[in-house]
Amino acid sequence: MRSLRDFTAGVGFFLRGWGWVARNGRWWAFGLIPALVAFAVYVVVLILLGTNAADLAEFLTPFADTWSWREVFRTVVAISLVLGGLAVAVLTFTALTLVIGEPFYERLSAEVDALKAADEQPWWRTLPRSIRDSLVTLCYVLLFTIPLFFLGFIPVFGQTVVPVLGAAVSGFFLTVELTTLPLERRGMIRKQRFALLRGNKAASLGFGVAVFLLFLVPFVAVIAMPAAVAGAALLVRTHLTPTATATPTPPPPSPHHPEPTP
């Protein structure tokens, strides 16, 4: 019961992220810039994959040349390649967008999750570490998704259980990517971040699966990216590290109305 409650809470943080960007339209527009750039890259790659999927399927299945039903089999392989490419695009879209938009999303995350004592570093210093961490995360994703890809060819099981497992794996690692910024601002390295999210699997899955399913819709991933960043900051602030979260510092007094001295 608690796991279900935490899973639902994770979904709720994504919805709260939408609420935050809806109330702060300027930050939503600010976060769209790197997402649009990454989206354009993926559109080109997926179009190339789609137009060459049949040839690629034939190249990958020379053993089927003598089969009477080779065309049907290769059509299934081609469709699987396109769907697999789409799934990889959904996963890596977040990583690429966060790398492209490091300075954008650092500011957005800090606006949502104000800390009195944050481990702030210039984006050009954190960029190499972000790329390295994203590559490590991608290796973990492939470790799970490649076996799931082949399990997808098993009748019934591949069309029912595998998609659910794929959504869970993809959702968890999306949460890993999206919570990197707020957790890094708390001085947490990659191993600590993974341990924290593993200890909060239900909430991590709820948030990540909601993001993953929405990111499957073309172009929605671009619109939703700022909300996902904001929601991840709220998830970390409110649920994952509530005791480590400080209250936001008040804004400085207006220069025209100086704060009175005691």
Image (spheres, rainbow, N blue to C red):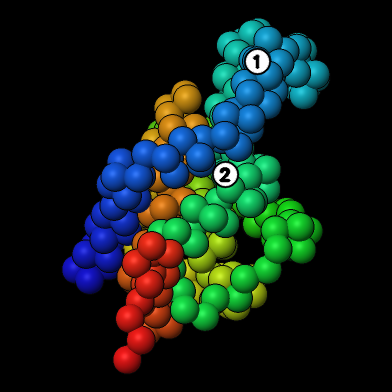
Q: Is residue 85 visible to us here?
A: no
* Contact? badges 2 and 1 (CB < 8 Å): no
Residue at left offset 68%, top offset 19%: 44
Side of 49 relative to 249 (left or right): right
Along the viewing direction, whichever of 69 and 86 lies nearer the viewer: 86
Quarter of the image for residue 203 reads bottom left
Query: As drawn, which residue projects farthest toward the left?
Result: 1
Q: Is residue 3 visible to us here?
A: yes
The circle drawn on residue 47 is 1
Residue at left offset 38%, top offset 72%: 258
* Label 2 secondary element: helix
Side of 164 relative to 177 (left or right): left
User: Which residue is label 2 attached to?
Assistant: 94
Residues at marks 2 and 1, CA–CA distance in whole angstroms: 19 Å
Q: Is residue 133 above or below residue 222?
A: below
Dot 2: few (<14), some (14–19), or many (≥20) neighbours within 10 Å?
many
The N terminus is located in which quarter? bottom left
Dot 1: few (<14), some (14–19), or many (≥20) neighbours within 10 Å?
few
Along the viewing direction, whichever of 129 and 58 lies nearer the viewer: 129
Q: Which numbered disc flags the more N-terminal residue, 2 or 1?
A: 1
